């Protein structure tokens, strides 16, 4: 394994431009501590570039990223000056689809019981991961408008579910549970109402779960899942669901574990270039104010290192974020007074100071 990995950085819009540089610093510090190196290349894809010259995702970008990079660090996309959100759909959904990043892994981990809005819950109660199918479902972009902008307008948005797509995400979730020795896995759909698409999820699920008898597997309809996540989150280790429901479940899970500013994610296809980003968006309401929480992005950076096989360096970042929260060094969303940049610098300094001894601290 080489000691240098090539990272494409797409900071994007809004707070993506503020949190991503802090993560680059934390990554540099963690890798330096472990005698490793990251070579970063920055891409300016986002609203500014789109408004300047119409570029969203260059047509050769997926092939270039696959060929020239080991992983992608992503910020966020979305800008009030682009109400259609066209650039975000082209770039973010474009990369997820064209790089075939079929796993969207979104861990929901409560670092400190002060941070959950739930009464009488602690770190043991909120510790699960959502696996969101990431390449099809309601996001497939198939549909259209008929008699647009007339009183008779009809809008069609197809929900695409393929046997291959459903099987590979369910299987990935089971394999993850097996690898991490997690006991419970829950698949969630709306097969009671969406009988064709989610009927397929049911049939594939019934087949695949037989191969993982050691894992306690169960099914919940998605409306019930959201209720149960709030009522008693301690019953979940691994949740697997479709693209749209995974989007919703992961924001809910983020809130249970301290808020969107803390939640990381990985868009993964094992063995291929994969993309890591915070779960949150570009947050135009706080952009440019140096108040965005950089921890979601930092933890996404840690997921990226783990994906690259550098677990000890990943732990350095995790431990630094834990340390900051423990010491109350946070941005205003978590009740602190720190700025994004100051907190980013603090993380990098802490990592440099503790070196490899800081892993797991
Ligand atoms: P959002 O995640 O940007 O913000 C939701 C709320 O959470 C806001 O009040 C925001 O201030 C707060 N928040 C988010 N991240 C935070 C952080 N790091 N620190 C502190 N507070 C934080 O979602 P939204 O407002 O629904 O969407 C804004 C734009 O972002 C839209 O254009 C949307 O499409 C886009 N978006 C992009 C992504 C992505 O790039 N992956 C994800 C979600 C939303
Ligand atoms: C996310 C976002 C995206 C999604 C949007 C920006 C299209 O909410 O990454 O969770 O729905 O997947
Ligand atoms: Mn979302």
Image (cartoon, helix red, strand yellow):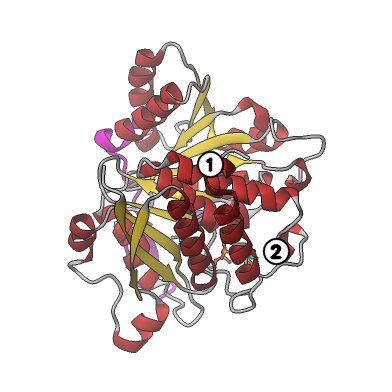
| Residue denoted by label 1 | 107
Residue at the spot 52% in from the left edge and 37% down from the top edge: 129
Q: Nearer the viewer, residue 296 or 249?
A: 296
Q: Nearer the viewer, residue 208 or 204?
A: 208
Q: Is residue 163 on the magenta stretch?
A: yes
| Quarter of the rendering containing residue 271 | top left
| Residue denoted by label 2 | 331
How far from the left and from the top, in percent, is residue 354? 59, 49
Using a 10 Å C-alpha cutoff, classify the residue at mark 1 as few (fewer than 14 neighbours), some (14 to 19) or many (20 or more).
Answer: many
Q: Could you tell me which secondary element the residue under label 1 belongs to? A: strand
Q: Is residue 103 left or right of residue 58?
A: right
Q: Quadrant of the N terminus?
A: top left
Give the magenta part as a residue range: 144-166
Q: Is residue 327 above or below residue 77?
A: above
> Which numbered disc, 1 or 2, marks the residue closer to the eye?
2
Q: Which mark is residue 88?
A: none
Does residue 275 appear anywhere in the picture? yes
- Mark 2 Cβ inside 8 Å of ligand 1: yes
Q: Quadrant of the C terminus?
A: top right
How far from the left and from the top, in percent, is residue 161? 31, 40
How far from the left and from the top, in percent, is residue 162? 27, 38
Residue that protrudes farthest toward the bottom in the picture: 52
How far from the left and from the top, in percent, is residue 82? 44, 79
Q: Is residue 189 on the magenta stretch?
A: no
């Amino acid at each position: 394994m080489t000691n240098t990995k090539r990272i494409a950085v797409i900071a994007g819009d809004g707070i993506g431009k503020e949190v991503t540089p802090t993560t680059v610093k934390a990554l540099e510090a963690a890798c330096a501590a472990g005698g490793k190196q990251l070579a970063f290349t920055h891409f300016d894809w986002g609203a500014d570039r789109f408004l300047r010259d119409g570029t969203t995702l260059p047509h050769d970008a997926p092939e270039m990223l696959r060929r020239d990079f080991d992983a992608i660090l992503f910020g966020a996309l979305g800008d009030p000056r682009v109400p259609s959100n066209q650039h975000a759909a082209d770039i973010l959904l474009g990369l997820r689809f064209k790089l075939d990043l079929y796993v969207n892994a979104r861990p929901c981990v409560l670092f400190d019981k002060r941070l959950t809005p739930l009464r009488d819950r602690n770190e043991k109660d909120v510790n699960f991961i959502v696996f969101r199918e990431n390449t099809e479902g309601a996001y497939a972009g198939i549909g259209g408008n008929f008699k647009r902008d007339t009183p008779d307008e009809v809008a069609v948005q197809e929900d695409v579910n393929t046997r291959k797509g459903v099987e590979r995400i369910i299987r990935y979730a089971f394999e993850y549970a097996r690898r991490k020795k997690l006991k419970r896995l829950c698949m969630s759909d709306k097969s009671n109402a969406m009988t064709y698409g989610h009927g397929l999820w049911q049939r594939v699920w019934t087949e695949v779960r037989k191969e993982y008898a050691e894992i306690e597997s169960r099914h919940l309809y998605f409306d019930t899942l959201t209720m149960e996540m709030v009522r008693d989150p301690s019953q979940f280790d691994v949740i697997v669901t479709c693209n749209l429901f995974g989007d919703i479940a992961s924001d809910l899970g983020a809130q249970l574990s301290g808020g969107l500013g803390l939640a990381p994610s990985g868009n993964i296809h094992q063995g291929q270039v994969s993309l890591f980003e915070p779960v949150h968006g570009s947050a135009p309401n706080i952009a440019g104010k140096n108040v965005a929480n950089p921890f979601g992005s930092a933890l996404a950076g840690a997921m990226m290192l783990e994906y690259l096989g550098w677990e000890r360096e990943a732990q350095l970042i995790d431990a630094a974020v834990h340390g900051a929260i423990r010491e109350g060094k946070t941005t205003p969303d978590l009740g602190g007074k720190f700025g994004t940049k100051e907190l980013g610098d603090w993380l990098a300094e802490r990592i440099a100071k503790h070196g490899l001894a800081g892993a797991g601290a």
